[in-house]
Image (cartoon, rainbow, N blue to C red):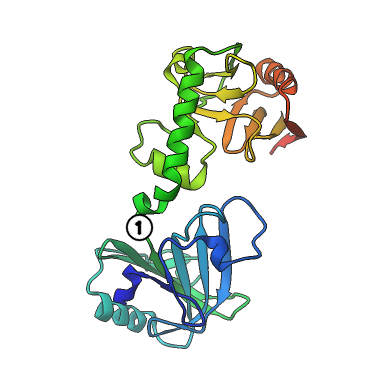
């Protein structure tokens, strides 16, 4: 299993190197967000399997985790786990739940363990009962992860840093700035998180760091719509997160109004992974919506319902 440090095996035995993009392995995936696909696989690393699941933050990003569904062949869980211990040594972490009311449920995990193999995370989870799938019954999953987010994000980091530099330059002498206040916290991606840059490059590259000249005008319940000096480029900013409007991931504005029901209701603006939320029929959200309607190149998707 030492080759797990280099990559992972597909069902046909092909070794795929870590760093390979999801859309290089799954060529017919149509969504633009979180990417996942189950693929046939009858054996992996000495175990009988049903399938494997490859996952990535986006289809144009590297596969970060592969989960092999371990087949229910009648071999007891303790024997399968013992085989892993022989191959990998004692796990660094192990959790058991043998007293729960759901111990015999296929949706319940009765044993979880994890290892670090030369910096590459490996994990296994076993169910309380066989779990059905389109590929046959499984009794657990063997997880193999890349684990090196610095390397995974590296190809996209220069473009993201350059976009931040251009944004900071535009904020030195902005054009029009409109401020809006809401009742709910606007923090989504903590700026002091040491993983922030990697996470954004991999998951939400449209989210940039809010430049200080704009951030100083905001707090955790205020956001801004502002333009550069020429009025050619428009931005939405919370105190920490900014998007440049009109890009591939920042042209669709989703406005959602949820009338109070079981919950208190809400009004939300979503653009890409950037969003702000306020109370139902919020005046600030309505004002921001009208202001966004004047920004060229945007389309709108409006929906309503009840806060159930």
19 versus 140 height, above or below: above
Residue highlighted by disc 1: 147
Q: Mark 1 Cα within 10 Å, few/some/many (few <14, many 20+)?
A: some
Q: Nearer the viewer, residue 233 or 269?
A: 233
Q: Nearer the viewer, residue 206 or 269?
A: 206
Residue 13 in the image: state x and y as whole percent: 46, 82
Q: Nearer the viewer, residue 158 or 193?
A: 158
231 versus 97 height, above or below: above
Residue visible at 40% across and 39% down? 197
Residue visible at 47% across and 73% down? 68
- Can residue 135 be seen in the rendering of this structure? yes
Q: Quadrant of the C terminus?
A: top right
Residue 161 in the image: state x and y as whole percent: 43, 35
Q: Quadrant of the N terminus?
A: bottom left
- Can residue 153 be seen in the rendering of this structure? no
Residue 51 in the image: state x and y as whole percent: 53, 76
Total labels drawn: 1
On screen, residue 89 versus residue 216, left or right, reads left
Q: Nearer the viewer, residue 291 or 227?
A: 227
Residue visible at 47% across and 87% down? 73
């Amino acid at each position: 299993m030492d080759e797990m440090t280099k990559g992972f095996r597909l069902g046909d035995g092909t070794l795929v190197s870590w760093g390979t993009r999801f859309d290089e392995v799954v060529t017919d995936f149509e969504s633009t967000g979180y990417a996942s696909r189950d693929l046939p696989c009858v054996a992996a690393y000495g175990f009988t399997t049903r399938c494997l699941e490859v996952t990535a933050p986006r289809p144009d990003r590297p596969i970060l985790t592969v989960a092999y569904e371990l087949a229910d062949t009648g071999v007891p869980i303790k024997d399968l786990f013992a085989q892993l211990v022989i191959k990998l040594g004692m796990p660094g972490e192990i959790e058991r739940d043998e007293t729960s009311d759901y111990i015999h449920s296929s949706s319940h995990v009765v044993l979880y363990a994890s290892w670090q193999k030369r910096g590459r995370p490996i994990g296994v989870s076993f169910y309380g009962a066989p779990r059905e799938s389109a590929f046959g019954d499984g009794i657990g999953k063997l997880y193999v992860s890349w684990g090196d987010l610095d390397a995974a994000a590296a190809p996209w980091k220069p473009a993201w840093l350059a976009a931040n530099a251009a944004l900071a330059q535009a904020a030195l002498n902005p054009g029009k700035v409109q401020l809006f206040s809401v009742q709910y916290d606007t923090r989504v991606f903590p700026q002091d998180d040491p993983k922030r840059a990697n996470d954004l490059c991999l998951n939400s590259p449209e989210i940039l760091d809010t430049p200080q000249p704009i951030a100083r005008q905001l707090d955790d319940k205020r956001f801004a719509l502002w333009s550069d000096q020429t009025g050619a480029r428009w931005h939405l900013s919370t105190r920490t997160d900014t998007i440049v409007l009109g890009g591939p991931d920042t042209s669709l504005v989703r406005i959602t109004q949820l009338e109070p029901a079981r919950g208190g209701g809400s009004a939300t603006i979503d653009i890409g992974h950037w969003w702000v939320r306020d109370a139902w029929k919020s005046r600030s959200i309505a004002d921001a919506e009208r202001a966004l309607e004047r920004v060229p190149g945007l389309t709108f998707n409006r929906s309503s319902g009840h806060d159930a």
